[in-house]
């Protein structure tokens, strides 16, 4: 059984959003087509309280995209984004959602960031996603979404660590930084992940 994991396809990560990923909107027609080729479709949603410490606005004198530390971990400070219950946190209106069986929210603890759909960045708290997937008999996890160099990358690493076969659908992702995405893809391959294109899936079945 194989699952499609849609990472953070939310308004704030689309062009015009608070933390826009270049060309983020271009993945939506692709992921809409992909969904019918999977046994299970699951989505994640970045879902921050206003006082979230990943926001530069909560650190005096700091600007978005500066680097700092949170709980001893390296942390990029972001513009305020994906505030719980706001339109920016909504899934993109053009995203086909009927097939999405569950949505896992993350980034709710104001003290720590949570890029992965499986765990927060310190791996202190699980979202329950891995057990959910195992409970559905999933062995292969295919990952698409935003941003390729942050939440997609961290989710991919955790999928591998949780023992799933992991496939990154490269053209169904867009990164914040192209260089960061290149490094992330190299690391995923070294960890045993596979990188494919949407056409590889759309061609079969
Ligand atoms: C993300 C930065 C901050 C992502 C979320 O979805 O990749 N990036 N929060
Ligand atoms: Zn975030």
Image (cartoon, helix red, strand yellow):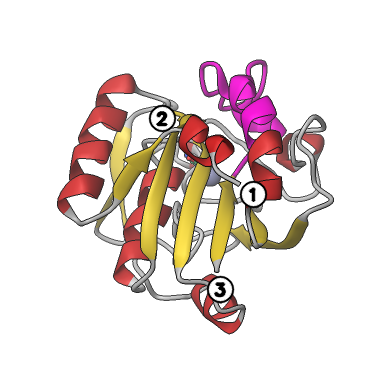
How far is mark 2 from mark 1, CA to CA?
48 Å
Is residue 107 something that shows in the picture? Answer: no
Disc 2 marks which residue? 61
**Residue sitting at 69 percent across and 26 percent down?**
29
In the image, is 21 to the left or to the right of 163? Answer: right
Q: Tell me the quadrant of the picture where the N terminus can be found.
A: bottom right
* The residue carrying mark 3 has its beta carbon less than 8 Å from ligand 1: no
Disc 1 marks which residue? 37
Where residue 79 sits: x, y (%)?
53, 30
Where residue 134 sits: x, y (%)?
52, 80
**Residue sitting at 50 percent across and 31 percent down?**
199
| Mark positioned earlier in the residue sequence (2 or 1) | 1
Q: Of helix, strand and loop, which one carries label 1?
A: helix
Quarter where residue 157 is shown: bottom left
Q: Residues within 10 Å of mark 2 (few under 14, many from 20)?
A: few
| Mark positioned earlier in the residue sequence (3 or 1) | 1
**On residue 133, which mark appears?**
3
Quarter where residue 196 is shown: top left
Q: Of helix, strand and loop, which one carries label 2?
A: loop
Q: Residues within 10 Å of mark 3 (few under 14, many from 20)?
A: some
Observer-side mark, 2 or 1, equals: 1
How far is mark 3 from mark 1, CA to CA?
17 Å
Q: Which residues are magenta?
A: 8-31
Where residue 62 sits: x, y (%)?
40, 30
**Residue sitting at 26 percent across and 39 percent down?**
184
Tag 2–tag 1 contact (CB < 8 Å): no
Seen from the viewer's position, the closer of residues 184 and 61 is: 184
In the image, is 204 to the left or to the right of 87? Answer: left
Q: Of helix, strand and loop, which one carries label 3?
A: helix
In the image, is 15 to the left or to the right of 2? Answer: right
| Mark positioned earlier in the residue sequence (3 or 2) | 2
């Amino acid at each position: 059984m194989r699952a499609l994991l849609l990472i953070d396809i939310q308004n704030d990560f689309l062009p015009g959003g608070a933390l826009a990923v270049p060309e983020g909107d271009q993945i939506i027609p692709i992921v809409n087509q992909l969904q019918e080729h999977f046994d299970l479709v699951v989505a994640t949603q970045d879902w921050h309280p206003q006082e979230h410490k990943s926001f530069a606005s909560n650190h005096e004198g700091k600007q978005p995209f500066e680097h700092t530390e949170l709980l001893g971990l390296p942390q990029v400070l972001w513009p305020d984004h994906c505030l719980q219950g706001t339109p920016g946190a909504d899934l993109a209106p053009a995203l086909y959602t009927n097939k999405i069986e569950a949505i896992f929210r993350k980034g709710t603890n104001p003290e720590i960031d949570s890029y992965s759909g499986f765990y927060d960045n310190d791996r202190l708290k699980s979202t329950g996603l891995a057990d959910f997937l195992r409970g559905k008999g999933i062995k292969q996890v295919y990952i698409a979404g935003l941003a390729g160099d942050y939440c997609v990358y961290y989710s991919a690493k955790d999928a591998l660590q949780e023992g799933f076969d992991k496939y990154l659908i490269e053209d169904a992702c867009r990164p914040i930084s192209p260089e960061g995405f290149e490094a992330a893809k190299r690391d995923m391959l070294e960890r045993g992940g596979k990188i494919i294109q949407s056409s590889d899936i759309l061609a079969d079945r």
